[in-house]
Structures are given as C-alpha cells and as structure tokens.
Amino acid sequence: MRLIRSFLNEPFFRNRLRSCCAGILYGMALGMLLSAQTASAAPLDMLIHDPFDTQGWVKQPLGQSWQDRQLQLPKAALPGTRSFVKPQSLAALTNYALAHNPQTRVAYENLQASAAGLGVAESAWLPSISLSDSAARSQSNTTAGFSIPIINSNSASLSLSYVLLDFGLRAAQKDGALAQLYISGFDNNSALTKVALSVTQNYYQLIGEQALVRAYAQTVTEDSANLDAARLKQHSGMATIADVLQAQSALAQAQSQWISAQATVRSDQAALAESCGLPPGNPLPLVPLNTHQLPPDITPSVQSLVLHATQHNPNVRAAAAQILASRATLREDQAQGLPTLSASVSAGKRFQNGLEPSQNWAVGFSLKVPLFTGFHDSYQIQQARRQERSARASLNQETQSIALTVYQDYQTVMGARSAAKAAQIAVKSAQASLAAIRAQYKVGLSTMLNLLTAQATLTTAEQTRIQDMTTAYVQLANLANALGMIGLPNTSTGFHS
C-alpha cells in the first residue's frame, strides 16, 4: 500500500490519471448524448453524416429514372451482316448458326470453365510451394530513455507443404469436378440441339410463308382476270354490275391477304436471321419449298425412338451426370469429418546490419482430427444424401418427360404427314373444279359467285397444304430435338449422328 501511495503522489502519475479519467468521462458523456439517435454506430461515426458523399449518386428526384453519365458498362458487340449469293439450305444455315449463335458460345465457354475446374481439383494432389521475403527498418527506445541504433533486417524463406492423407477428400473433389464437366458437356450438346431446332422451325416457318405469298399472288392474278372477265361480260350485256362488284371484293381481299403475308415473311426472315446469329435485317435467300413433295417418312417404330431418346437425349444424360456430382459431394462431405495428415518443410535466411546472416529451417507434420463442429458436418452429410436422392428422382422425371415428348411428336409427325397428303389431293380437286367453272362462266353456264367460290376453295386448299407441309417438317424437327439430334433425322434410317 505504501508503494501504491508513493506512485500516486508522483506528479507524473497524477497527471496521467487525471487525463485518463477525463477521457473516460468525456467518452461516456458523448456516448450518452448520441445514444438517443442510434445504438448501432460508434460515437465518432456520428460526427459526419455522409463523409463519402454516397447520396451524390442519387441526384434524381423521386419517380424519375436513375442514370450516371460517368458509368462505363461493357457493351455488347452486335453481329455483322453477311451477304449470301446462293439460296441457302437448312443444313448450311444450321452449320452457320452453330458457330455464330451466342447461345452456343455461352455453352462452349461454360464447358471450358468446367474443364478448368477439373484442373483445380487435380492441383490438390500436388504440393504447394511459396517464397516470402520481408524487409524492415526499426528503432526503439529503452525505458531509461536511451535510443537503440536503427536496425535494418531482411528475411527470406521458402516453404513447401503437402497433404499426405485425407481419406478420399481430394478424390471426391476430383470426381465432383469431373461430373460437373460431364454436365457442362451435355448442356453444350443441349444448346446445340436447341439452336438447330430454332433454325429449323424458323426456316420452315419462313419458306412456308413465302409459299403462301406466292399462292396469294397467284390468287390476286386469278381474281384480277376474273374482274376483267366480269367487266367484259358487263359491257356485252351478259353480266350485271353485281358480278363486277363481287369480283372487285374478291380481288381486294386477295390483295389484303397478299400484303399481310409479305409482312409476315419479313418478320419470319428476321427471326431466322437472329437464330443464325445474324442481324434481324440480314437478307437470307432460301430454296423455295416444294409443296408437291411430302416430308420424309419415319421408318423406326415409336418404341425404338423412345429407347433412343432415353439413352441419347442430352437433358437425360445431364440429369444422370448430376447423380454422379451429388455422390461426389456426399463423399466429400463425409471426408470432411475424417483426419488429415500434412507435411511441411521450410528454410530461410535472415540478414541484419552488423550481424552475420542467420539461417533457419523446419520440418514438421500436422494431424488434424475434427472432434465437434456443432453438428455442421452431420447435417451437411444429410443434405448431400437427400440431394443425391433428389437427383435420382429428377433423372426419372426427365426420362419420363422425354419419352412422352417423343411419343407425342411421333404421332404429330405421322398425322401431319397424312394431312399433307390429303391436302395435296384437295388441291388437285380444287384446281380441276376451278378450271371447269371458269370454262362454264366464259360461256354463261355459271355465275361469278360460283367462280369466286371455286377460287376461294383453291386458295384455302393451297394454304392448308402449305401449313400441313411446314407443320410436318417442324414436328419432325421437334422429334429430332427430343431424340438428341442436331438437325432433321436421316430420310433412310430416321437417325443420323
């Protein structure tokens, strides 16, 4: 107690004690003053409300869009135009789209990233080597007030560490990365089939509309000839004004359909160009659709097609690979709770002014045995086990969905092909009927109404035939996509690689 009183009687310690007490009282007072405003911020943080001027980024008033003139966002590169001299086939456009559509580029880059991820997992089997070097200049004073000379020091060390035993952790990580590579590969294949399907759908939609434009143009020509014939017969007294008005109405309706079909062609052409990775306004000359040739028949049975799809569809195979990834995750989580044995080797040298260099080295082993993680590992293992079961159920769900899609597409293709065949017969009958009624009208044995009705019947039959033909081709493309094929099946076997 006497020693403590003697320290307290010293002027130096009394001044320090007063300063500390004053600082404590000031801090308590400031904290109590600011506690009414906020309880989550430190007292000194409340001295300046917005020191970094964050509200300067929000200058627009309420209800107006936000923008920043200095913001520099990455800009997308729009595709360049390409001129095609010769009419393009479906195969040529599909090959071009597979190389230029951004969707295939995204899938390909993801596949490359997964391959690099496998390299990350493989690197765990190699030792890690690090080199460190530090330089310092220091000076300190003794308690007696004497200064120690300035010390310049430099230390360099080389260390190596390697995991000797991990009870399958690295192997599980490698298998997980490999399964992810499989998934990305099948996703890449799925992207290719989707792009090919999009090109095929837009291709036949466009050439179908082009065929309709030609059919409507032929109808306009026929209706214009009917109008001329009605006017001639009216001048000769063999027809009334009603025939002329009926012919004019039919011509106006045909012209309206023709103009509307031309606008649809321009829209469909933009969709086809976009699916090929081209600007929407890029012209694409195509081979006209042969409406007299039926789509290819499907020789394999529907059961063989379903079996082929369940084995080769990329979505089904990606779902199967997801099971492998879930199993690897389960093994990795189980290995996290097992011991790990590591070895380390290090060597270094220290340089200090006025002294000889000193060397140091160390060889050691470390054993890590997890004892308790707050039940984290056990719950993580349960989660991985459930995810593996979920992946199995997803595979069954995807397989059943693909089997149903193949069966339905098969029936739709067969029905559309039969409908297109019947539509061809209807067109031939409508053409013969129109020719007979036109001959009768010229000699006064038929009316203008009968002639226009026969012309409308032929137009409808032509439209139905074109729609059935394009529908059959589009449904055939849907079937090929469900089978995991790029493009349409081979006409001879129904399959192609």
Image: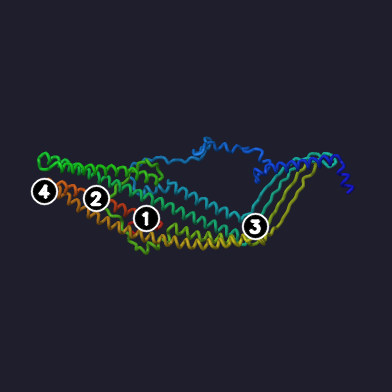
Left or right of 134 on screen, residue 196:
left
Report, in whole angstroms, how far the alpha carbon at label 4 lies from the one at label 1. 50 Å
Q: Secondary structure at mark 1?
A: helix
- Crowding near the residue tagged with mark 3, few <14, some 14–19, many ≥20 C-alpha atoms within 10 Å: some
Mark 4 → mark 3, Cα distance in angstroms = 101 Å
Q: 266 or 259: which is nearer to us?
A: 259
The disc, 3 or 2, on the residue closer to the chain's N-terminal end is 3
Give the side of residue 451 with respect to residue 94, left or right.
Answer: left
- Which of 265 and 365 lies nearest the eye of the viewer? 265
Q: In this figure, which residue is indicated by the disc labeled 4?
A: 445
Please tell me whether mark 4 or mark 3 is closer to you in this view.
4
Judge by depth and name the residue closer to the eye, 368 or 33.
Answer: 33
Whichever of labels 1 and 2 marks the residue nearer the N terminus, that label is 2
Q: Nearer the viewer, mark 4 or mark 1?
A: 4
Residue underneath mark 1: 478
Q: Position of residue 289 (x, y in %)?
A: 29, 49
Residue ID for mark 3: 163
